[in-house]
């Protein structure tokens, strides 16, 4: 028999504290909560100041001006979280949680966003290891009851989410006799894993900081987390164009030819990614140009820039003995090597200085626009062991949790920010408080369904994710993967090994071009979406639960046959019903990509409210589940009243966006508006007020434009107001 454990919960205000647990034996109540901003509280347990915190590595300090402008929200617990410092060096934190709460988050978990009733090892690792280990195991979760909890300490953290029944807990489920005698009535199904009423997190550390967030709804809670972590990253406009990474051995001539091919095929291109072969040595690396392949790096970079194409350089941060900076970095590196390359200790300012000077001179000065920082994840066989030592005294464990973050922070804050130049880059590991990092995560795994889930998962923890395209078995798969990636923070083909090009499956080339062109046309909408991430903390791409809380997952216990070899506990596991194969792209577009066995037909669950087809404006439903079966175009649905600015024409490079006129569409019947954000698209001057805002409003079939803030503009005037409501 199935038992429904969690049902949809509608929430407006956090309402925890229904259960009042006595303080468990040996644990101390945490009552020293310091209010930092409306809806944000912090506590410090043990010697948290001796630990590396994620927020200390954030790209920017907390955005208190934005947080303080938000309404107050109630503290979600009543002195119930408890902690203990145990004899064996473990710190334990126990946060109350009822058994019917749905728990979400913990970073880039690609196997689903609901993390209720799991045990997770939050360690930076390659995704294939699973069990919580992932490229970005952000120790932040949100609950369906309307609060968020952030463990702000860079340690391996093991989380028991509603798993592990304490004997002094006041509301454990009653035990059920698994083998009742025949005369007794059955008492309901026996459960192999009775749910527990807490989240317990343990770590080996001298202490830790815990930050609690509360707000009006789940999106507001995530936004406050992002604002506390410095606000979301703001891309340069070019970062939102199309990216192509060429095969690892390509030289300057081959790369140039590839760019020309894009133009011939009328395919957009803004960023060309060079893979390891651009360096004199790779694995370990030198970060120096390979002159046999690129005899004139400055000339090559400039020629690309002249075509509007930016360069992104692949690197992994392990330094070859042949690198000119090796000698200086040797004493500033850890005890163990990775791929026989030294591992610079980025906590040391001297090490950062050497690296940034070299990167500035050899790359930034000639116009290199960004990096792909690879292999900063990885498990024991790849990276340094936990007993490695680093000259700064930072533990090897904290270094593993933050190495990707440290590279992001160095490149953003020491290299690009002082040059007043924005980058949009890639990285393979990240962690807490990363919202302000202009880096998007990617993986070597390649499951299309997981790649789509990643877009929702990332939105819950202040990270960005690209479901990059590499290859495909069929034209249909090729098209659907390209369609997915066009609705992500980095629309990228990574042909480093496959040597693929967007036009490789001629049967679908027109549709591939159409979706990339659509992304380009949506630039005004997308750029504003990122400005809202930057200024208000709103994730640019969002899990459905942040849009409509009636979409909070339900969990069903699954029954299973007893099998004395394969399933001696007749444990059917849980069936988590969640909608993680569709997501919100910006404030008003719902994207439901085709994928895998759903490559020709799929269902789409529409949130409450009227929804309209993006392409035709036709009404499609309200809180209903619909079927779609036209794989030539990505299913896109728009909210009632949405106003969406597009470029009037498709373009092949973001440079062409300059002064292009706009088509402003209005969907449905409700009046609506869109505050279009623009700045210079390149620098940090927007942080000092150099941006423009124009309000595009639509009422009674008529559009009006009002200037709210005068500043630099990227796009032209509105040429067309179109009413799409039918
Ligand atoms: C992998 C990375 C690939 C590619 C390759 C180059 O680790 O995930 O995208 O860059 O290295 O050697």
Image: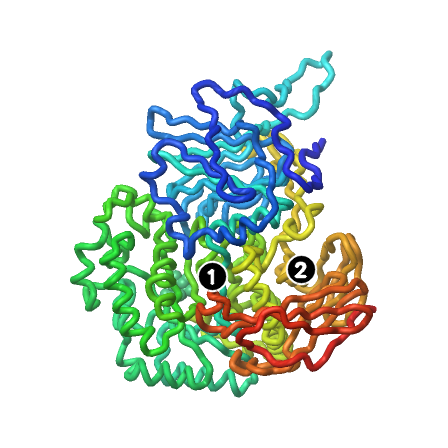
Q: Nearer the viewer, mark 2 or mark 1?
A: 1
Q: Position of residue 144 (x, y in %)?
A: 63, 40
Q: Locate residue 353 relative to residue 416 in the image: left or right.
A: left
Q: Position of residue 425 (x, y in %)?
A: 43, 66
| Residue 560, visible in the rendered structure | no
Q: Quadrant of the N terminus?
A: top right
Q: At numbered mark 2, what does the secondary structure look like: helix, strand or loop?
A: loop
| Residue 241, visible in the rendered structure | yes
Query: Which residue lies under the disc numbered 2?
Result: 598
The circle drawn on residue 440 is: 1
Q: Which residue is drawn at 55% across and 64% down?
A: 531
Upstream in the sequence, badge 2 or badge 1? Answer: 1
Question: Would you place residue 634 above or below residue 53 in this image?
Answer: below
| Of the pair 515 and 71, the residue shown nearer to us | 71
| Of the pair 711 and 568, the residue shown nearer to us | 711
Please identify the quarter of the rendering in which residue 251 is found: bottom left
Q: Where is residue 551 in the image (x, y as percent from the top left)?
A: 69, 47
Question: Would you place residue 225 above or below residue 644 in this image?
Answer: above
Please identify the quarter of the rendering in which residue 52 is found: top left
């Amino acid at each position: 028999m199935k038992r429904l454990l969690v049902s949809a919960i509608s929430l407006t205000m956090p309402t925890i504290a229904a259960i009042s647990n006595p303080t468990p034996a040996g644990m101390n109540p945490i009552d020293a909560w310091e209010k930092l901003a409306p809806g944000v509280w912090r506590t410090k347990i043990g010697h948290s100041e001796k630990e590396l915190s994620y927020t200390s590595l954030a790209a920017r300090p907390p955005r208190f001006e934005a947080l303080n402008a938000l309404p107050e929200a109630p503290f979600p617990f009543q002195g119930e979280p408890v902690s203990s410092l145990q004899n064996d060096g473990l710190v334990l934190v126990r946060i109350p949680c009822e058994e019917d709460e749905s728990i979400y988050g913990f970073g880039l978990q690609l196997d689903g966003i609901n993390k209720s009733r799991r045990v997770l090892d939050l360690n930076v690792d390659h995704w294939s290891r699973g069990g919580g280990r992932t490229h970005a195991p952000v120790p932040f979760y949100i609950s369906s009851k309307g609060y968020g909890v952030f463990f702000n300490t860079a340690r391996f953290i093991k989380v028991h989410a509603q798993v592990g029944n304490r004997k002094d807990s006041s509301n454990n489920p009653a035990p059920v006799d698994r083998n009742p005698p025949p005369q007794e009535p059955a008492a309901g199904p026996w459960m192999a894993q009775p749910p527990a009423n807490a989240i317990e997190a343990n770590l080996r550390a001298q202490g830790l900081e815990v930050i609690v967030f509360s707000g009006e709804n789940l999106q507001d809670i995530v936004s406050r987390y992002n604002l506390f972590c410095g606000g979301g990253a703001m891309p340069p406009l070019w970062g939102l164009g199309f990216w192509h990474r060429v095969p690892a051995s390509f030289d300057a001539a081959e790369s140039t030819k590839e760019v020309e091919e894009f133009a011939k095929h009328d395919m957009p291109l803004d960023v060309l990614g060079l893979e390891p072969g651009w360096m004199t040595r790779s694995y370990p690396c030198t970060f120096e140009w390979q002159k046999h392949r690129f005899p004139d790096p400055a000339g090559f970079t400039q020629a690309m820039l002249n075509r509007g194409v930016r360069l992104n350089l692949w690197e992994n941060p392990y330094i070859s003995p042949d690198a000119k900076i090796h000698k200086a970095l040797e004493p500033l590196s850890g005890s163990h090597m990775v791929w026989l390359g030294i591992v610079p200790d980025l906590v040391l300012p001297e090490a950062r200085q050497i690296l940034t000077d070299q990167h500035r001179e050899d790359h930034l000065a000639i116009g290199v626009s960004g990096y792909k920082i690879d292999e900063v994840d990885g498990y024991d066989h790849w990276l340094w062991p936990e007993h490695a030592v680093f000259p700064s005294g930072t533990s090897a464990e904290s270094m593993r949790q933050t190495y990707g973050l440290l590279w992001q922070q160095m490149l953003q804050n020491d290299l690009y920010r002082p040059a007043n130049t924005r980058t949009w880059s890639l990285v393979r590991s990240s962690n807490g408080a990363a919202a302000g990092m202009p880096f998007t995560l990617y993986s070597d795994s390649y499951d299309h369904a997981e790649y789509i889930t990643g877009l929702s998962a990332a939105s819950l923890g202040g990270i960005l994710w690209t479901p990059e395209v590499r290859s495909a078995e069929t034209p249909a798969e090729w098209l659907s993967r390209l369609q997915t990636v066009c609705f992500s923070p980095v629309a990228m083909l990574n042909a480093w090994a496959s040597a693929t090009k967007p036009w490789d499956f001629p049967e679908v080339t027109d549709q591939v071009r159409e979706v990339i062109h659509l992304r380009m046309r949506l630039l005004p909408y997308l750029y504003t979406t990122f400005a809202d991430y930057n200024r208000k903390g709103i994730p640019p791409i969002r899990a459905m639960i942040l849009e409509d809380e009636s979409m909070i997952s339900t969990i069903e216990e699954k029954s299973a046959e007893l099998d004395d070899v394969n399933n001696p506990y007749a444990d059917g596991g849980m069936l988590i019903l969640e909608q993680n194969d569709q997501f919100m792209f910006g404030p008003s577009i719902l994207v439901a990509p085709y994928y895998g066995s759903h490559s020709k037909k799929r269902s789409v669950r529409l949130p409450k409210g009227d929804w309209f087809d993006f392409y035709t404006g036709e009404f499609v439903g309200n809180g209903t589940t619909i079927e779609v079966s036209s794989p030539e175009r990505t299913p896109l649905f728009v909210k009632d009243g949405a106003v969406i600015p597009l470029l009037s024409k498709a373009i092949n490079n973001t440079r062409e966006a300059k002064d292009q006129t706009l088509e402003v569409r209005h969907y449905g019947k409700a009046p609506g508006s869109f505050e279009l954000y623009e700045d210079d698209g390149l620098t940090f001057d927007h942080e000092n007020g150099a941006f423009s805002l124009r309000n595009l409003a639509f009422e009674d079939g008529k559009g009006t434009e009002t200037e709210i803030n005068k500043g630099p503009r990227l796009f032209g005037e509105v040429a067309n107001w179109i009413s799409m409501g039918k």
